[in-house]
Amino acid sequence: MAQAPEPAVIRADHLDLTFQTDDGPVHALRDVTLDIPNGAFVSFIGPSGCGKTTLLRCIAALETPTGGSLTVNGMTADEARRARAYGYVFQAAGLYPWRTIGGNIRLPLEIMGFSKAEQRERVARVLDLVELSQFEKKFPWQLSGGMQQRASIARALAFDADILLMDEPFGALDEIVRDRLNEELLRLWDKTNKTIAFVTHSIPEAVYLSTHIVVMSPRPGRITDVIESPLPKERPLDIRDTPQFIEIAHRVREGLRAGYEE
């Protein structure tokens, strides 16, 4: 018997977003329709300015669509934000330099009113998840860029939302560190079973990490392809040398090219 598909936790239906500027309207997103299943790892890839981050910000209720509809966990994006349905990891780690790593992770828990005992338990748990347990009392400037990004991920995980939104978190890191963090992110995803929406400019990163790859066109951002990956959930780095991986990467590249030609 065929297994029933996972329900969509993020659903966009003919989503549009137009910014009004002094130079006239800027069409950022046009007719975006997409379902993100529960527990999926979905990467958004496309050229700079195509609306990848804008779409992520719509999901996070940081931008307001001008057309269509968007639901997150069956709620409007704004209701999901108030219900703390997601954690958000930005391109830069965004850690406060005057707070320790533990203090940075604890900050949203303090704002949300968690007890001190619950804060300690959650901080310890997420630091262990990202392998930074020995660095709780260090300050951000004492950590490498990759370690700071791991701390930023820990902060987003601390209040245990079901959805993790990640806006190109490894883009500024060198390839060796990026590979290591890609491996760690897959391990975290496997442990936590969260739904992850991930923005990247890297074809190998998108193919390596994802269960679904959403290919977007130049502005106005449209979806040119949604690729459901046949790769196994457990993925060593050398899977990138396999014919199956190369074939998926080729399809992503073709989808990007098609977006320019339309």
Image (cartoon, grey):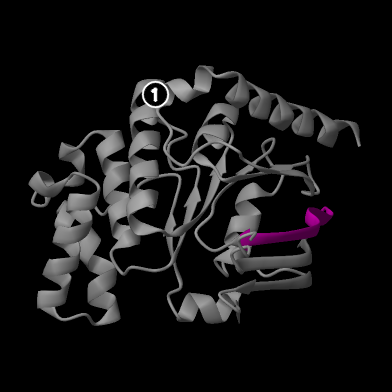
* Residue 71 image position (x, y, % from top left): 64, 74
**In the foreground, 81 or 125:** 125
Q: Is residue 249 visible?
A: yes
- The quarter of the picture where the C terminus appears is top right
**In the displayed structure, does residue 123 sit left or right of residue 192?**
left
**In the displayed structure, does residue 82 sit left or right of residue 25?**
left
Q: Quadrant of residue 131?
A: top left
Residue 135 colored in magenta in the image: no
Specify the segment rendered in magenta.
Answer: 23-36
Q: Which residue is identified by label 1? A: 174
The residue shown at (57%, 78%) is 78
- Density class for disc 1 (Cα within 10 Å; few <14, some 14-19, many ≥20) is few
Q: Residue furthest front?
A: 1
Residue 33 colored in magenta in the image: yes
Name the main secondary structure of what is drawn in magenta. Answer: strand
**In the displayed structure, does residue 45 sit left or right of residue 133?**
right
Up the image or down, 179 lies above or below 170; here it is above
Q: Is residue 99 visible?
A: no
* Residue 181 image position (x, y, % from top left): 35, 35
Label 1: element kind? loop
Up the image or down, 82 lies above or below 240; here it is below
Count of numbered tags? 1
The residue shown at (26%, 49%) is 151
The residue shown at (25%, 54%) is 96
Residue type highlighted by circle 1: Asp
* Residue 144 image position (x, y, % from top left): 24, 33
The residue shown at (39%, 51%) is 189
